[in-house]
Image (cartoon, helix red, strand yellow):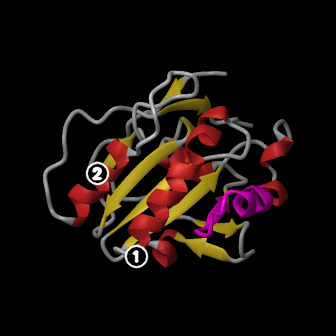
Amino acid sequence: MARTPSNMLPLGTIAPGFKLKDTNSNNDYSFEDLKGSKGTLVMFICNHCPFVLHVIKEVVMIANDYRVQGIGVIAISSNDVEKYPQDSPELMTEFAFENKIDFPYLYDESQEVAKAYDAACTPDFYLFDDQDRLFYRGQLDDSRPGNGIPLSGTDLRSAIDALIYNRSLKEPQKPSLGCNIKWK
């Protein structure tokens, strides 16, 4: 199990645009189509990574808690499905159903979106403000598979709360840690 940290895209970076297929609805969506009125959470995940499997229930709870407050939520898988067939679009649909993911789970076949976001690992979280500027990037919380720290979503929840309620964000922002993106 590789332990790859986030690359920590500079704060203030404008969200890179994209148009990708949603494996839940089979529709194509852009960032503009999915962004929220108060901000947008973009996360890079996949079906098989132990780090993603460890946090997925908390991620879904966060999505459900904050979408009603104006936060758009987008999940993207960019892994090479030829080498990692368990991350194929068909299995993404199944994974979303099994984990009650009812926000878009997009497939980045070309990996161009992951490159544009400088994504490095799964899970990797990016929170943009209502002007599409990067407000937070980093970890969900300090919990990792096997480290005994319970999941809380503290870091990401604090960032979203700060964004919604116009509060300053605690520093430093800690990088996420997970499996490396499976590049072609």
Relative to 120, is 93 above or below? below
Instruction: Say whether residue 32 is left or right of residue 161.
Output: right
The residue under label 2 is which amino acid type?
Answer: Ala
Residue 85 x/y as whole percent: 86, 43
Q: Neighbour class for label 1 at 10 Å: few (<14), some, many (≥20)?
A: few
Magenta includes 95? yes
Separation of disc 2 and disc 1 at Cα?
16 Å
The residue under label 1 is which amino acid type?
Answer: Val
Circle 2 residue: 159
| Label whose residue precedes the other's in the sequence (2 or 1) | 1
Relative to 100, is 49 above or below? above
Circle 1 residue: 68
Pick the front one: 20 or 84: 84
Badge 2 marks a residue whose secondary structure is helix
Q: Quadrant of residue 101?
A: bottom right
Tell me which residue sits at (54%, 58%) in the image. 60
Q: Is residue 127 visible?
A: yes
Tell me which residue sits at (54%, 35%) in the image. 120
Q: Quadrant of the N terminus?
A: top right
Q: Neighbour class for label 2 at 10 Å: few (<14), some, many (≥20)?
A: many
Tell me which residue sits at (29%, 36%) in the image. 173
Give the residues in magenta: 92-106
Total marks in image: 2
Magenta includes 96? yes
Pick the front one: 116 or 65: 65
Q: Is residue 134 visible?
A: no
Residue 84 x/y as whole percent: 81, 38
Q: Quadrant of the C terminus?
A: top right
Badge 1 marks a residue whose secondary structure is loop
Label 2–label 1 contact, CB within 8 A: no
Relative to 130, is 86 above or below? above
Residue 19 x/y as whole percent: 60, 68
